[in-house]
Image: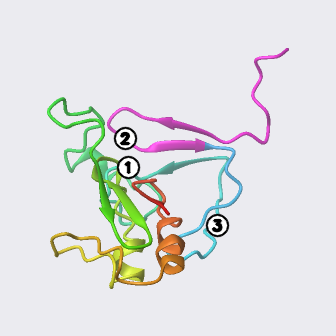
Amino acid sequence: MTDKPDKNQVTIEPKENGPLLVKGLKTLKDAQGNPVEIKKDVIALCRCGASSNKPFCDGTHKTNGFTSAREISKPLDRERAYRGKSITVHDNRTICSHAAYCVKELKTVFKKDAQPWINPDGDSVDAIIRVVEKCPSGALSYEI
């Protein structure tokens, strides 16, 4: 048995008050599903949300007050269920990365300025599943 990591293994290391350092990643796609060229063995992905070179870090976290410290006042998990006739959509705001596939691609279901903001009867089950499965953070999930 060895402690050496597999050459093909992808590792993610969160830097304190900074980006995610990703090693060993071979492919990456943008919000539209287009391939993003990876030029280095180690890449820094934005975690503060303010990079002008997303998904890559441009150092903006150093000047915008980003902190990686978990705020004690925030609950660790804040999942809410939106029940429809044929599908229940679960949403956990505390882990949302704000990639916005949901509100951009299925506006009949995900309405960011409405209350409630998710209408699970607003489109077909297949359309909802397709968009929920694109959620990069896992904040959205579903059950039938």
Disc 3: which residue: 37
Whether residue 113 is in magenta: the answer is: no
**Amino acid, disc 2:** Gly
Label 1 vs label 2, nearer the camera: 1
Q: Residue at x 25, y 77 (%)?
A: 111
Q: Compute the Cα span from label 2 to label 3.
A: 22 Å
Disc 1: which residue: 47
Magenta highlight range? 1-22
Whether residue 3 is in magenta: the answer is: yes
Q: Nearer the viewer, residue 113 or 6?
A: 113
Q: Residue at x 50, y 80 (%)?
A: 127
Q: Tell me the tag on residue 18.
A: 2
Looking at this view, name the residue that lies furthest to the front: 85
Q: Using a 10 Å C-alpha cutoff, classify the residue at mark 2 as few (fewer than 14 neighbours), some (14 to 19) or many (20 or more).
A: many
Element class at badge 3 = loop
Q: Looking at the picture, how far across and down is residue 47, in whole percent?
A: 38, 49
Q: Looking at the picture, how far across and down is residue 31, in whole percent?
A: 49, 72
Judge whether 44 appears above or below 34 on screen.
above
Left or right of 8 on screen, residue 85: left
Q: Using a 10 Å C-alpha cutoff, classify the residue at mark 1 as few (fewer than 14 neighbours), some (14 to 19) or many (20 or more).
A: many
Q: Compute the Cα span from label 1 to label 3.
A: 19 Å
**Amino acid, disc 1:** Arg
Q: Looking at the picture, how far across and down is residue 125, in whole percent?
A: 49, 77
Element class at badge 2 = loop
Q: Earlier in the sequence, mark 1 or mark 2?
A: 2
Q: Looking at the picture, how far across and down is residue 43, in whole percent?
A: 56, 49
